[in-house]
Image (cartoon, rainbow, N blue to C red):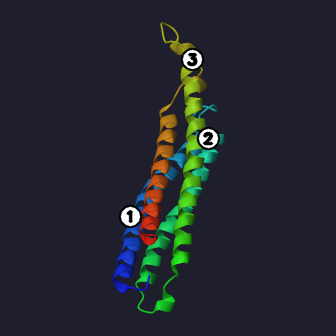
Amino acid sequence: MSDSSPLRAIAQMFRLTGWVSFWTQLVLGVVSGGILLFAILSQRTGNTSSNNPGTGFGVFLALSGLIALGVSIYLAFRYTRLGKQLESSNPSNRPRKIETIQVVRFGLIVNLVGMLLTLMGAEAIVGTLLSKSLTMPQFGAGVYTQVDPSRVIQSLDIFVVQANTNTVLAHFAGLVGSIWLLNRITKP
């Protein structure tokens, strides 16, 4: 990374990719976090049934995926700072290539683990929704008054699925950015 023109191009790539990844993940993460917080608070205030798939192990995994997303958002911001350091006129202020690669690889690992946790949470939540849909009675005359509310799929249940989908998409954006950067800096 001694030639200034390729170094400048890599630095600009780090900054641009970092900012795009940062904002994409931040927006999707805030939306997902808000939805999950709303689902948890709704459960605690008694607005939903106790058998809501927005609780339990599925939400724990979804929240774990959001925590990993927080780390990924930080790393995306760090990419922007690395880009700025790479543009430094003083070579001793620039990070070494191996250090830069390690940061990007760590970003890949964080996003893969976060995506795994979030997908496992989605599986648990969707499994609960499937169970509810299969155990719902067929509606006919007089059945509406006999339905157990804990067995009805509610709109909040679908919101929780949407939150997980947003988190997976955010991790995917982080993966794309990290893979792009890793490809660019390891090019011969």
The quarter holding residue 188 reads bottom left
- Who comes first in sequence, dot 1 or dot 2? 1
**Between marks 1 and 2, how big is the CA–CA gap?**
29 Å
Q: Quadrant of residue 181?
A: bottom left
**Is residue 8 visible in the rendered structure shown here?**
yes
Q: Amino acid at mark 2?
A: Gly
- What residue is shown with label 1? 20
Tell me residue 16's x, y (percent). 36, 70
| Residue 135 drawn above or below residue 111 | above
Which percent across, then down, holds residue 78? 49, 72
Determine which residue is flagged by label 3.
Answer: 147
Label 3 is placed on what type of residue?
A: Val
Q: Give the structural element (helix, strand or loop) at label 3.
A: loop
Mark identifier at residue 100: none
**74 left or right of 45 in image:** left
> Which of the two labelled residues, at mark 2 and mark 3, occupies the earlier sequence position?
2
Closer to us: mark 1 or mark 2? 1
Q: Residue at x 51, y 82 (%)?
A: 95
Say if mark 1 contacts mark 3, CB within 8 Å. no
Q: Residues within 10 Å of mark 1 (few under 14, many from 20)?
A: some
